Image (tube, rainbow, N blue to C red):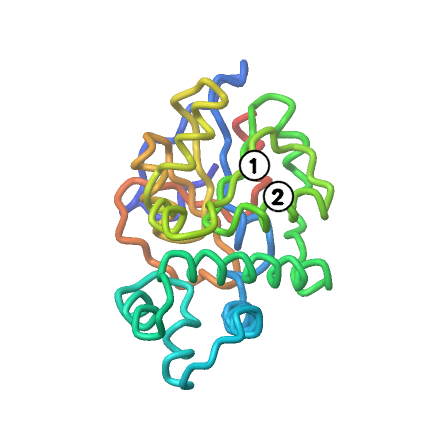
């Protein structure tokens, strides 16, 4: 693995040949093409909920409810409309997950070509997929594309609790480590929150460069950079 930034570099991780370190990966922008779920997914999901609940609301209120984030404005707007905020948010996310799955099934997003290397990496190390994307969407991606290398697959839970546990919180990464019975390894991501989550979980952060993050300059100290997942083979 080559270090692309000496200012932010740390000592290279040691991946033992007996596989006693975990290789964990983010999904969006690392495995699945694209930086994130299209915001239009959440807009359409909100419309689904409005129809489902037969909800009548002014356009300015609906605009506040389209956001991916669970914010004070979101909660306050729900209360003004007589809605329970956490329940409404969870329902909106359920529809967002369905919409995101429909887009992927329709061919809107595919896998990066270097994902093929996972099969070779899996021969020596336990491999997991840990994403901020919705758990139903993450599970669908693995099944839809027939990715067999991952022995742990986890997206965040739908609803407010899942939102609050998303990276840089290490909650789901730590769940992967607990499943593997390990406490060391690497986490490969494409954004600063991934690097922070890796550090918070005690793992070596690895930043993979993709077209959408070529100009990213993380403020995190001590991370490694790769240009392709294939570079991980140097450690196996």
Residue at disc 2, secondary structure: helix
* Residue 73 in picture, x, y percent from top left: 28, 70
Task: Look at the numbered discs 2 and 1 and tell me whether their residues touch, using CB distance below 8 Å.
Answer: yes
Instruction: Name the residue located 40 percent from the left edge and 69 percent from the top edge.
Output: 67
Instruction: Name the residue located 37 percent from the left edge and 34 percent from the top edge.
Output: 204
- Work out which residue is located at the far bottom of the displayed protein and give it: 59
* Residue 68 in picture, x, y percent from top left: 42, 64
Q: Earlier in the sequence, mark 2 or mark 1?
A: 2
* Residue that label 2 marks: 139
The foreground one among 100 and 46 is 46
Mark linked to residue 153: 1
* Residue 17 in picture, x, y percent from top left: 54, 17
The foreground one among 118 and 165 is 165
Q: For marks 2 and 1, give the CA distance.
A: 7 Å
> Circle 2: is it few (<14), some (14-19), or many (20+) Cα within 10 Å?
some
Pick the quarter of the image with the C terminus.
Answer: top right
Instruction: Name the residue located 31 percent from the left edge and 54 percent from the top edge.
Output: 218
């Amino acid at each position: 693995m080559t270090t692309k930034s000496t200012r932010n570099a740390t000592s290279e991780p040691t991946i033992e040949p007996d596989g006693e370190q975990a290789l964990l990966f983010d999904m969006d922008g690392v495995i699945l093409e694209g930086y994130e779920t299209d915001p239009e997914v959440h807009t359409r999901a909100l419309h689904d909920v409005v129809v489902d609940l037969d909800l009548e609301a002014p356009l300015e209120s609906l605009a506040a409810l389209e956001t991916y984030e669970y914010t004070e404005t979101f909660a306050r707007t729900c209360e003004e409309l007589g809605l329970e905020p956490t329940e409404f948010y969870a329902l909106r996310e359920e529809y967002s997950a369905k919409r995101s799955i429909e887009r992927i099934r329709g061919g809107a997003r595919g896998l990066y070509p270097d994902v093929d290397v996972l099969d070779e990496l899996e021969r020596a190390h336990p491999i997991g997929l840990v994403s901020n994307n919705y758990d139903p969407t993450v599970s669908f991606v693995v099944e839809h594309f027939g990715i067999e290398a991952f022995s742990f697959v986890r997206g965040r839970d739908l609803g407010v609790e899942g939102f609050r546990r998303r990276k840089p919180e290490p909650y789901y990464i730590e769940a992967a480590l607990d499943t593997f019975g390990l406490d060391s390894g690497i986490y490969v991501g494409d954004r600063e929150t991934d690097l922070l989550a890796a550090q918070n979980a005690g793992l070596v952060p690895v930043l993979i460069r993709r077209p959408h993050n070529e100009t990213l300059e993380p403020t995190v100290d001590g991370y490694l950079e790769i240009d392709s997942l294939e570079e991980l083979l140097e450690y196996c």
